[in-house]
Image (tube, grey):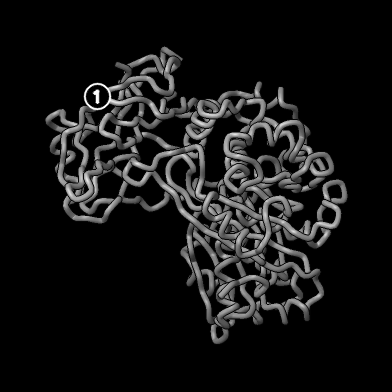
Amino acid sequence: MTIKGQAYIAGIFEHPTRHAPDKSTAQLHAEVAKGAIEDAGLTIDDVDGYFCAGDAPGGAWPMVDYLGFNTKKLRHIDSTETGGCSYIIHIGHAAEAIAAGKCSIALVTLAGKPRTSVMPPRAAGAEVDFEAAYGATTHNAYGMCAMRHMHDYGTTSEQLAWIKVAASHHAQYNPHAMLKDVVTVEDVVNSPMISDPLHRMDCCVVTDGGGALIVTTPEIARSLKKPLVRLIGHGEAMKGPRGGKDLDLTYSAGVWSGPRAFEEAGVTPKDIKYASIYDSFTITVLMQLEDLGFCKKGEGGKFVADGNLISGVGKLPFNTDGGGLCSNHPVNRGGMTKILEAVRQLRGEAHPKVQVPNCDLALVHGTGGLLGVRHAASTAVLERV
Amino acid sequence: MSEAKTQEKKYPAPQGNPETQAFWDAAKQGKFMIKRCTACGEAHYFPRSICPFCFSDKTVWEESSGEGEIYTFSLMRKSPTGPYAIGYVKLKEGPAVQTNFVDCDLGALKIGQKVKVVFKPTDGAPLPFFTAV
């Protein structure tokens, strides 16, 4: 059994806010849910599947009640929690559920307010006594990856900086982007060092907000008014130090999720016209591009340099909304916005200055957790029909 | 960053549990323990009762040399308690260990540098850290 072509993304919505002190987190979920349902031309009463992750206040059952689903109809619920890539995993799981006849219209929501309030701590894992005291954070966990990548492959800060430069070229056209200024390689490498070798501008933004989407059957998608975008390949994977034997911070679980998605889709990295690549940090993008096969391991620095990721300039336009590095990284989770921009590209709804001509095949890839410690990854291949 | 000091830092006491209590009891004696599987022969860290490589329950405690080299590190400068260096050490016995580097010049850390274990007190059992040899 395959999910290839069995499920379509028929509704999308990204909250325009980047700072929401005047709203509740549940309210943000409701606002993005409403936006995605209306974008699809449906109503909440039509929805029979719901997907949410750790950002949903209280989990699935309080959200289902709060949002006011028709619970006589709601028949599939999935609260898979894999950090920032949860929502990329959700669209794969939604496609599986749809293919199996378990639901026909699934809603996925993400929302939260890390810029306004402190995020609740994650529940402790078995490693807690052996790691918590050492202060692993997103910054230094990705710093450790970058340090080793530089050591093994000669990757430079200037090469990493090109990733931020490309994102900033795209963000200048996004009226909702948190950072709209175009920056240079010099700006990035001269910004303050946060956790060696990552500078402030190697890091993504922290934003309040969220996004939502609708996954549905081919038949229902065709009955709606939006351009047809379908999921044709999906992969998921996890990676960690595994007893300290497998520690290699120069690659991510994308080396496994990527091939799974490409194989199911029947395409290769060369076929991809647009890529949404998780960009919590510049190093995240570089490692994942290598892991997905857009270039050889160790050659990511060369691949991203000189504007190769800038739409209209380079070979692989990426994160044309400005990504997490410049536009939005709601709830410190970038997976949802990665899907949304890929769908905009496939619909032809991206900003004209960054729209990829005849964009009919896009890739979405994300990470959850910490690449430098343990993490999940998910890859999705989307096609315009 | 050579002036960075970590001695004053207050570290949380490990909570311990039945699976790992022997590690913390040994730490109180200044011993740094790892686990080894007698079925497949592999050592691992942090300690588990079931081997993460072959899933055998024949795992035994073993005192580590506490010596190894830096696999990677990052000097975290954005911290309310002052800068600290987080990293991984690859022990002589094989397993990699997440840690902080202390009591040495944090500005001079290098991948491949030789380090050894040192214990720092908490309100409970002491915690293992690593310092330059």
Q: Based on the displayed image, in which of its 4 quarters is residue A37 positioned? A: bottom right
Left or right of residue A56: residue A36: right
Examine the rendering and report whether any part of residue A127 can be seen. yes
Residue B31 percent location from the top left of the image:
16, 30
| Chain bearing mark 1 | B
Quadrant of the snapshot with the N terminus of chain A:
bottom right
**Residue at the spot x=19%, y=55% of the render?**
B57
Residue B81 percent location from the top left of the image:
41, 27
Does A214 sit above or below residue A123?
below
**Residue at the spot x=43%, y=46% of the render?**
A374
**Residue at the spot x=20%, y=27% of the render?**
B65
Helix, strand or loop status at disc 1: strand
Left or right of residue A382: residue B9: left
Q: Based on the displayed image, in which of its 4 quarters is residue B45 positioned? A: top left
Residue type at tag 1: Val
Left or right of residue A88: residue B12: left
Residue A292 percent location from the top left of the image:
60, 48
- Residue under label 1, please give it: B118
Does A104 sit above or below residue A333?
below
Depth check, front residue: A228 or A198: A228
Give the class, few, some or many, for how many residues have Cα within 10 Å of label 1's Cα (few <14, many ≥20): some
Depth check, front residue: A71 or A320: A320
Quadrant of the snapshot with the C terminus of chain A:
bottom right
**Residue at the spot x=72%, y=70% of the render?**
A10
Examine the rendering and report whether any part of residue B82 can be seen. no
Residue A317 percent location from the top left of the image:
76, 45
Q: How many marks?
A: 1
Depth check, front residue: A48 or A237: A237
